[in-house]
Image: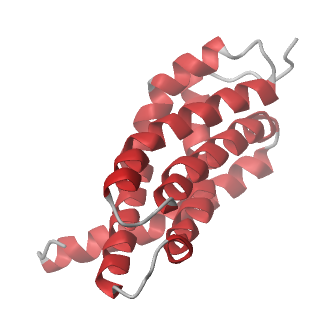
Amino acid sequence: MNEEPQASRTARAWLAVVLMAPLLAVLFLPSLALVHLFVDTSNSWADLAYLVTGALAYAVGVIVVLPVTAHTLGRVVDARTSEIGTVRAAGVFGLLAGAMGSVAAVPMTLEGNVGLAPMVTYVAAPALAAFVTRLLLPVALAHRGVRVTAYVLAALAMAPIAAYVATVGLSGVAF
């Protein structure tokens, strides 16, 4: 039997977005530097291209993919896994996030010159972030302090994206 605090599906989805954004920032962005472990990095333009692509993927992921997935597929999976226990449900969410990340990672790994770096960045980081997010969800639902901390950390994780968008909007120049 699962003894999680109750909340509406909408509230659970938004809280999952807020919990996962900083986790993804902490796991995804530093993993971009792992490209140096897998390939010869003498071509600095290739390194820069990988880092810029990853930063853009993070921005789109946090601003678009994460909320849309949480409010569509995430709600369905949350409803279906509500009776199997928090750890098992977290495993399902981790597998789901890893599978979604593989859509980007597999072509980059097979066709690119970056070795296995995309597998770490686009599969392992989102899978671990989703797993931890689902583990933290009942704790955040039960404790207001955890929710407030999550909102502050999510704002910090999204601040660079907002700053970039504001800068581009003010300058009128696109990247």
Q: Locate residue 129 relative to residue 52 in the image: left or right.
A: right
Q: Position of residue 9 (x, y in %)?
A: 58, 22
**Residue in the image at 50% along x and 69% along y:** 32
Is 69 rendered above or below residue 44? above
Q: Locate residue 97 relative to residue 171 in the image: left or right.
A: right
Q: Position of residue 106 (x, y in %)?
A: 41, 46
Q: Position of residue 149 (x, y in %)?
A: 71, 57
Q: Locate residue 92 relative to residue 159 in the image: left or right.
A: right
Is 48 rendered above or below residue 64? below
**Residue in the image at 50% along x and 59% along y:** 116
Quarter of the image with the C terminus is bottom left
Q: Quadrant of residue 2?
A: top right
Foreground residue among 132 and 101: 101
**Residue in the image at 71% along x and 31% along y:** 91
**Residue in the image at 54% along x and 60% along y:** 28
Foreground residue among 169 and 75: 75
Q: Quadrant of residue 171?
A: bottom left
Q: Quadrant of residue 31?
A: bottom right
Is 18 rendered above or below residue 79? below
Quarter of the image with the N terminus is top right
Q: Position of residue 87 (x, y in %)?
A: 80, 30
Foreground residue among 11 and 129: 129
